[in-house]
Image: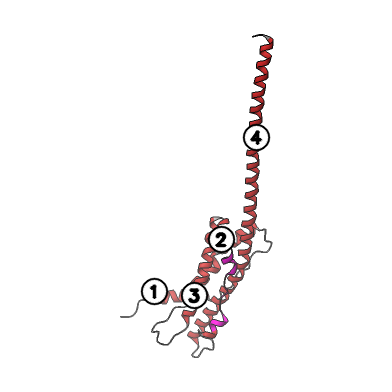
Amino acid sequence: MSPIEFSNELKGWQTGIGALLGFLALIVGALWNFHLNRRRDAALRAEEALSVAAALYGEILLLRKEVGRLARAVANVHVNGGTTRNPIVKFDEHFLEAHSLSEPLLYKALAPKIGLLSSDLILYITEFHQKFQEARMSLPLLVDKPGRKYGYSVATVLVPARDAVKNIQPALKKIERMASVSRPADDVDLGQTEDVIEMEEEFLNTPSPP
């Protein structure tokens, strides 16, 4: 091959190599942009998940206090009813009005975004609201109704109320770490709730006399 022919051949290769390098540069650039977009999307999802968790955390603290107050009140009325012949406070419409539980508005509004949270937080939060609603729906059952020949145990309210207060604690601690909350959630006083639940379970498990 003459020098002129070799030079022409080299020019052709240079063109092909330049095109290949340009194509590779485009691929690398596209992959890098994709990587940056993924990082940006992940950061946005993490930020949104933290916002959702913080909002639910604030609402749960309020609802947790409410259901704790309800548990204390139900337990006190039950104990006083067993020790007082004519108790002043009893399970009636006035009691229901004084101890009604709030509607979890934020939980319902943010339900489509719950999936942004980790699986353990989802389980804890959904269980809390399930127990909260169970206590809320069971409360009216404690009121005696004419013509109804049976009654409901106070445990139908106290057990879910206690579980709502206690079982959510790991989730609250995790969200506090995520959001760098300086003051952790206060403990909720359940009063005589555990004692009454134990008495009710013992009573229900005691065999009837022949």
Distance Cα–Cα, label 1 vs label 2: 42 Å
Rendered position, 12 above or below 169: above
Sequence order check, earlier mark of 4 and 2: 4
Q: Are marks 1 and 2 in contact (CB under 8 Å)?
A: no
Instruction: Indicate whether residue 106 is drawn in magenta.
Output: yes
Sequence order check, earlier mark of 1 and 4: 4
- Image x and y of residue 176, in percent: 64, 60
Sequence order check, earlier mark of 3 and 2: 2
Q: Which mark is residue 26?
A: 4
Quadrant containing the N terminus is top right
For residue 37, which quarter of the picture? top right
Distance Cα–Cα, label 3 vs label 2: 24 Å
At label 2, the amino acid type is Pro
In the picture of the structure, the residue carrying the numbered disc 1 is 205
Residue extent of the magenta highlight: 95-109
Rendered position, 54 above or below 89: above
Quadrant containing the C terminus is bottom left
- Image x and y of residue 168, in percent: 56, 64
* Image side of residue 177 versus residue 135, left or right: right
Sequence order check, earlier mark of 4 and 3: 4
In the picture of the structure, the residue carrying the numbered disc 3 is 137
- What residue is at 65 percent from the left and 28 percent from the top? 21
At label 1, the amino acid type is Asn
